Amino acid sequence: MIVIGITGGIGSGKTTVTNLFQELGIAVVDADVIAREVIAPGSPLLTTIADHFADHYNLDILDASGQLVRARLREIIFADSAAKEWLNAQMHPAIRDEILHQLEAATSPYVMLSAPLLLENGLDKLCQRVLVVDIPEALQLKRTQQRDSVAQSQIEAIIAAQMSREERLKRADDVIDNSGDTSALAPKVQQLHAQYLALS
């Protein structure tokens, strides 16, 4: 099974692109979705994480219904590198196991692995090709602010935590430029789809 890794900086339109591949019948394994699933309310992993932050930081990261309050957790892990490292050590193995499980279960001619930190977390080792959805940084800021209505400083912190645009492009096998209108994406996806079908 050919695995195509797809990544891009925040606000680059990765989801829009993977949706187009899904419309063509291609299975998409989404690391972001998996990251939410492994810490669903009541899951053993979420309980472990909640207990740790309650014990070590005197912080309740769950709401009344047992859901993770992401903003509360995000504040701590952006401010405290030890907290971030501990959290990653819990999350990454669980996410990786589920990614492998879903990749093996895929039945389309090839499968896409979508991850914002595909290259940073070494998930590209599971892929035969890497597709980068690329837009300039100024556009990343603008689109993310429109979508998430969060502070510019927070988006800049996320961009800074991701691999630089130059480095990401250097490591790409294929690139989709998404700086134009969304309608321009479909033909680009069709073209790559044909190329990937030929590989598989």
Image (cartoon, rainbow, N blue to C red):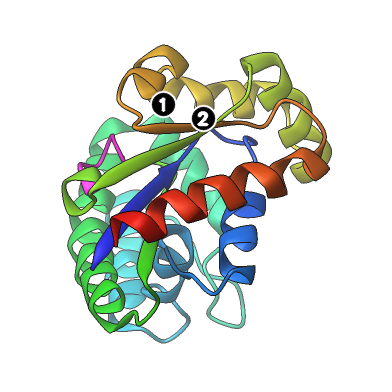
Magenta residue check for 121: yes
The amino acid on which the numbered mark 1 sits, given as a three-letter code, is Ala
Residue 48 in picture, x, y percent from top left = 27, 72
Let me know if residue 81 appears in the view: yes
Residue 177 in picture, x, y percent from top left = 61, 28
The amino acid on which the numbered mark 2 sits, given as a three-letter code, is Ile
Q: Which mark is residue 161?
A: 1
In the image, residue 80 above or below residue 96: above
Residue at point 76%, 39% (across, down): 184
The 10 Å Cα crowd at callout 2, few under 14, some 14 to 19, many 20 or more, is some
Q: How many marks?
A: 2
- Residue at the far bottom in the pictured view: 42
Circle 1 sits in a helix, a strand or a loop, which is it? Answer: helix
Q: Main secondary structure of the magenta part?
A: loop
Residue range (magenta): 118-123
Apparent side of residue 31 relative to residue 26 in the rendered image (left or right): left
Q: Which residue is mark 2?
A: 158
Residue at point 23%, 68% (across, down): 1
> For residue 77, which quarter of the picture?
top left
Residue at point 29%, 83% (across, down): 105
Q: CA distance from mark 2 to mark 1?
A: 5 Å
Mark 2 vs 1: CB contact within 8 A:
yes
In the image, residue 49 above or below residue 143: below
Q: Which mark is residue 169?
A: none
Q: Between 41 and 171, which is closer to the camera in this rendering?
A: 171
Q: Between 131 and 121, which is closer to the camera in this rendering?
A: 131
Let me know if residue 113 appears in the view: no
Magenta residue check for 39: no
Residue at point 55%, 56% (across, down): 70
Location of the C terminus by quadrant is bottom left
Residue 35 in picture, x, y percent from top left = 40, 64
